[in-house]
Image (cartoon, rainbow, N blue to C red):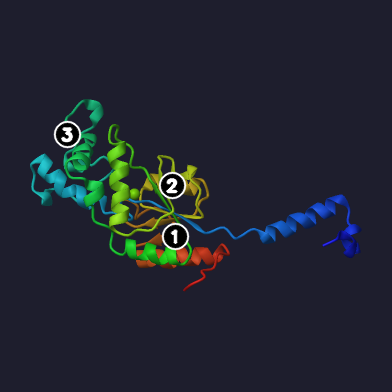
Amino acid sequence: MPLADYPELQALSAHEKQEFIDELRSTLRPRRSFIFGVDLDGVVMDFYGGLRPIAATWLGRPVEELTERFTYGLKEWGLLDRAEGYDLSYEALHRHAINQHELFLSGTPIEGAAYQLRRLSRLGVHIRIITHRLYVGGLHEVTVMQTAQWLEKHDIPYIDLCFVKDKTSINADLYIDDSPTNIKAFAAAHRPCIVFENSTNRDLKADLRARNWEEVYTLVKQQMSRAGNGPAVS
Ligand SMILES: [Mg+2]
């Protein structure tokens, strides 16, 4: 189209023309998908539920003796700090669970997680898995392999798979996590995060909280609409 056909455009200053072009460009750009940053352990996979019977056998104790109300490091199960040079360290148990029991492949999904993630994917949600699983040296290859195989095995949709310690370094419109440390880090960085409730995070203040994956689905849908990424399919 010749510019001469639009005298009103010719009358614009160079700055106004640039603003007009920028505005046109922004309307042409396809709308970005809503990114949901999803933690795995304790949210999508029942990591400690899978680890508990393995730990009981490893420690030579009845499984009922290992309390389900534990803290990070599992001292309540009788594990000791590696810094003290003990064999019964969390790291030694973790290594055993991954190498001998393929825990990241054999673990049970949290009820409803795979199904609701498939529903969210159908709504157009960009699912970005964000997990801090590479915290034990020498297990990186097997951890990444088992994780990818487990996600396939349970038909869990995702676009990105991020292994990272500082989860706030990975961008998302909304996160979900159960770890108090990560939940506090997201809050400090002003990133919205759904707290997936368990005994370790029940007392934390949170605007978004879910006790099951049906509630997660509803919250994600609400946050999407609020961000202007209304679902194409309900
Ligand atoms: Mg977790």
Identify which residue, 215 or 151, lies in the foreground.
151
**The N terminus appears in which quarter of the rendering?**
bottom right
Question: Which residue does the numbered mark 1 point to in the structure image?
Answer: 208
Q: Label 1 vs label 2: CA separation?
A: 13 Å
Sequence-first disc among 1 and 2: 2
Above or below, 10 relative to 88 = below
Above or below, 118 relative to 183 = below
Q: Which amino acid lies under the numbered mark 2 shown in the image of this protein?
A: Lys
Question: Which residue does the numbered mark 3 point to in the structure image?
Answer: 88
Number of other residues with Cα within 10 Å of mark 3, as a class: few under 14, some 14 to 19, many 20 or more? some
- Disc 1 versus disc 3: nearer the observer: 3
Q: Which amino acid lies under the numbered mark 1 shown in the image of this protein?
A: Leu
Mark 2 secondary-structure assignment: helix
Q: Are marks 1 and 2 in contact (CB under 8 Å)?
A: no
Residue 119, given in percent of the width and then of the height, sits at 40, 67
Sequence-first disc among 2 and 3: 3
The residue shown at (28%, 36%) is 139
Number of other residues with Cα within 10 Å of mark 1, as a class: few under 14, some 14 to 19, many 20 or more? some
Question: Which residue does the numbered mark 2 point to in the structure image?
Answer: 184
Q: Does 101 sit left or right of 109 as displayed?
A: left
The residue shown at (39%, 44%) is 181
Above or below, 43 relative to 94 = below
The residue shown at (24%, 56%) is 108
Q: Which amino acid lies under the numbered mark 3 shown in the image of this protein?
A: Leu
Q: Does 64 sit left or right of 176 as displayed?
A: left
